[in-house]
Image: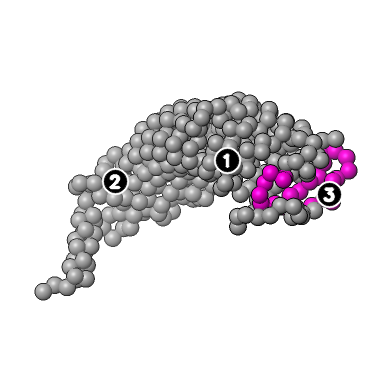
Amino acid sequence: MVSQSAFAFICCLSLLLTFAHCKTLKRDVKALNEIKASLGWRVVFAWVGDDPCGDGDLPPWSGVTCSSQGDYRVVTELELYAVSIVGPFPTAVTNLLDLTRLDLHNNKLTCPIPTEIGRLKRLRTLNLRWNKLQDVIPPEIGELKRLTNLYLSFNNFKWEIPKELANLPELRYLYLHENRFTGKIPAELGNLPNLRHLDVSNNHLVGTIRELIRVEGSFPSLRNLYLNNNYLTGGIPAQLANLTNLEILYLSYNKLSGTIPSGLVHISKLTYLYLTNTSKALGLMERARLSLFKHFPYQAEYHLVPYLGRPLLRTNHSATLPHLTSSRPNMWRFSLWRFFTR
């Protein structure tokens, strides 16, 4: 009798032979060859042959992943990152309708993302960070219902963040930092049931945090929230305490005012709170020392240097507040550098 290991080997070999004899869908072959013609020798020196999924003794093209679909092979992943692609976004990519992963990060792509991006209905990961993409994010990106990871940081996007991003029910990670977005952060993003990480830092965004978390039940799965380095105004709303899964909160370098709500202590998973260099005082200096910190049952590292005038503590001084005892093993780090005004 044939052993189980031998049987498994025969099955795998059969699958490989079947895959090898499948023809690649003509639509995908045409699309990849159009991309090959547009990218130049720097990228495609290893793209040998006419079939991106491999042909005979020729292997699949570097960065191209294929899978069988009936009697055909289709392209399911395209990863061409850090290969110095220069010029407009290759629109032919949007003809690869079975893509689940598109990674073109760390290149020199310019111009806007084409509106045809909405055709990639099976896409789960879209990584275009570290390019020179411009103008607005097309609202058609909200048609990618299976998208879980969206990386658009370190580009030149401007105008407003499209509220159509709230139409992505599977989205978990949204990176929009280091762009030129203006306007308010769409409160509709709070309706995303699976969003864990939202980073809109280092833009030109305005509005208040209260407007972002205006509905009870907003951001039910959010763990990391980065709003720093924008032009947000108003206070830190007590509604933040409703984000019970929050672990990291960056609010530094905005124009916030008012006091820090003591309700933040009830976010049991919150580990890091950064409020560095806000332009207006968030509570008086002594109130912060004597009233605020006593509400937090943690050991806390803190940096207290006034925005103007003599420092309360020496620059870069870090200390453990003596009257705080830790009831949990995690450390609560406050970064309040240049936090207070005279």
- 3D distance between C-alphas at marks 2 and 1: 37 Å
Left-right relation of 265 to 223: right
In percent of the image, x 76 and y 54: which residue is there? 322
Q: Amino acid at mark 3?
A: Leu
Q: Would you say 196 lies left or right of 291 here?
A: left
Q: Please name the amino acid that badge 2 sits on.
A: Val
- Give the magenta-colored segment's residue range: 293-316
Q: Indicate the position of residue 289 as horizontal and vertical percent values.
A: 78, 44
Identify residue for label 1.
Answer: 225
Q: Nearer the viewer, mark 1 or mark 3?
A: 3
Display colour scheme:
one colour
The image shows residue 200 at horizontal and vertical percentages of 58, 37
Q: Tag 1's secondary structure? A: strand
In the image, is residue 223 above or below residue 208?
Answer: below
Q: Quadrant of the N terminus?
A: bottom left
Mark 2–mark 1 CB contact (< 8 Å): no
Report x, y in % for residue 238.
Answer: 62, 33
Query: Which is closer to the viewer, label 2 or label 1?
Result: 1
Q: Which corner quadrant of the image does residue 157 belong to?
A: top right
Query: Which residue is tagged 2?
Result: 74
Distance (Cα) linking label 2 and label 3: 63 Å
Marks 2 and 3 close (CB-CB < 8 Å) = no
Residue for point 72% across, 45% down: 293
Tag 3 residue: 313
User: Considering depth in this image, is 196 or 60 the residue closer to the camera?
Assistant: 196
Query: Is residue 32 among the parts visible in the rendering?
Result: no
